[in-house]
Image: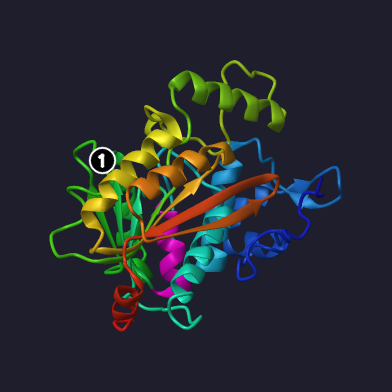
Amino acid sequence: MEKPGAEKSTLHSRNKHRSRYDFKALTVSCTELKSLVSVNKYGDESIDFANPVAVKILNKALLKHFYQIDFWDIPEGYLCPPIPGRADYMHYAADLLASCHNQVIPKGKKIKVLDVGVGANCVYPIIGHQEYGWSFVGSDIDDVAIRSAKNIVDINPSLKNAIELRLQSSKNIFKNIIHKEEQFDLTICNPPFHASAEEALAGSQRKSRNLGHKNHSRPVLNFGGQDAELWTEGGEVGFISKMIEESKSFKNQCFWFTTLVSKSENLGGIYAMLNRAEAVEIRESEMSTGNKITRIVAWTYLNEKQQEDWVKGW
């Protein structure tokens, strides 16, 4: 097992979080963090990763230090995601676009990305915009999450006019969000992967034990999460199957559809659905953060000529 704080060599080569956390620099960027830093059993400066307050303040520090985000906050109980893994998705997404563009990553606001389930934290659009200058639309079914994300965008000048938030008022994924004639170069999604509240609770209890909490029956998650962020009917496969089905209706409005897939046993069914949907091309990238391996599955309905024509606009 890798020593906490050691270089995260499994992260993408462009990920700014490959090195161990420099808490001296982070506490300069965010003075709130200072009181939460202590020396761990390995003799390194660290925080209590089982403490949700400490994790939230660490995120604030990381976003300020690496991405120049002066204000970032989320409502209590909402998902507070680990920044390194979120950054990895953005870098692999950039590689995907570059693969169709002579291995040159397209940058700037002309690249338009849809984040399905943006959450209250707005982290994917923040990183994607600050790293590559892309413009984003973030959608969510939770109006509190949308208001929180909008507040983050409105208060940080570097994000203004680059990120738009849209409330999904139905049970659809792309419908009611993608406007007529609107085009996206990329869609991203980190779907809820539990199939029920009971399954989500069991997962939370397991994580609580791993973090060293004593009260496993009523865990306090260090990364939080509302029901809609943690579980959905049918679980990960149910959500992604609906996404694939809906994607067919927008086959000429989106270049690449992508989603995270957390469970390798779900890949076979997902590939079968994509083949039935007649996706022209399917790609898969593996990401590894710590001990966790997840995958990005990407698909497009554009043939080679259509892809060539599309990237001329980049």
Answer whether residue 70 is visible to the viewer in this image. Answer: no
Magenta region, residue range = 122-133
In what quadrant of the picture does the C terminus appear?
A: bottom left
Which image quarter: residue 41? Answer: top right
> On the image, numbered disc 1 is attached to which residue?
143
> From the viewer's perspective, is residue 184 above or below residue 207?
below
Q: Residue at x 53, y 66 (%)?
A: 91
106 is within the stretch colored magenta: no
Residue 69 position within the rendered picture, expressed as x and y whole percent measured from the top left: 46, 64
Residue 253 position within the rendered picture, expressed as x and y whole percent measured from the top left: 23, 63
> From the viewer's perspective, is residue 222 above or below residue 256?
above
Q: Is 76 displayed left or right of 59 in the figure?
A: left
How would you classify the magenta stretch by its main secondary structure? helix
304 or 208, nearer to the observer: 304
Answer whether residue 304 is visible to the viewer in this image. Answer: yes
Q: Residue at x 70, y 20 (%)?
A: 214
129 is within the stretch colored magenta: yes
285 or 8, nearer to the observer: 285
